[in-house]
Amino acid sequence: MSYTYDDQNIFAKILRGEIPNKTVLETEHTLAFHDIYPQAPIHVLVIPKGPYVCYDHFCQTASDAEIVDFTRTCGKVCEMMGVKDGGFRTIANAGENAIQEVPHLHFHILGGRNLGRMLAPAE
Ligand code: 5GP
């Protein structure tokens, strides 16, 4: 499957510095920042700087350096946010069924409270 990246999405604008963000950590290939509408006491978004629509797109086409950097940054964010002891959840919504709102790959890292079961019952 091929993906078309929309460079007008909100995270592309954040990466270009057109919209402010509350940065947690920035590396060569990755940016982590606080979600604007946090759904838990800790809610950080981790995004690659490259133009990847979703996780599948990233896994299939990103360089090894980007993948390692992204993955290590997720680990560092967990450490910085102190979620290891209480537990946390990582979510990467992709496409229509997952109701992905922003078409630039992002991992949600959520913690700081009991997050309930993984999925809400189907409607
Ligand atoms: P999705 O539904 O695509 O998995 O999640 C998109 C996330 O991006 C949501 O949790 C939403 O609150 C967050 N978000 C949307 N616009 C902005 C923004 O301008 N700044 C930040 N920091 N987060 C945003």
Image: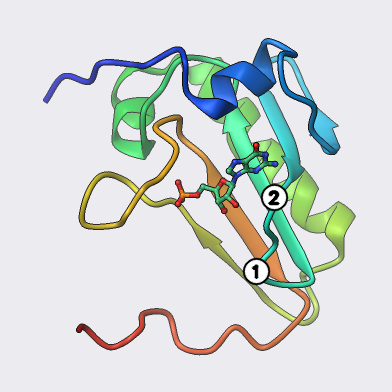
Residue 29 visible in the current orientation: no
Q: Residue furthest left?
A: 1
Residue drawn 77% across the image and 22% down it = 27
The residue that appears at 48% across and 19% down in the rendered structure is: 64
Classify mark 1 as within 8 Å of ligand 1 or not, answering yes or no: yes
Q: Residue 45 falls in which quadrant of the image?
A: top right
Q: Do the residues labelled 1 and 2 touch (CB within 8 Å)?
A: yes
Q: In this view, does 58 lie to the left or right of 25?
A: left
Give left or right: position of 87 versus 41: left
On screen, residue 83 versus residue 6, left or right, reads right
Residue assigned mark 1: 39
- Please name the residue that numbered disc 2 is placed on: 35
Q: What element carries label 2?
A: loop
Residue 87 image position (x, y, % from top left): 69, 78
**Image vertical order of residue 1 relative to residue 51, above or below:** below
Residue 71: image quadrant is top right
Q: Quick check: is the Cβ at mark 2 less than 8 Å away from ligand 1?
A: yes
* Residue 89 as seen in the image, left or right of residue 114: left
Residue 84: in sight, yes or no?
yes
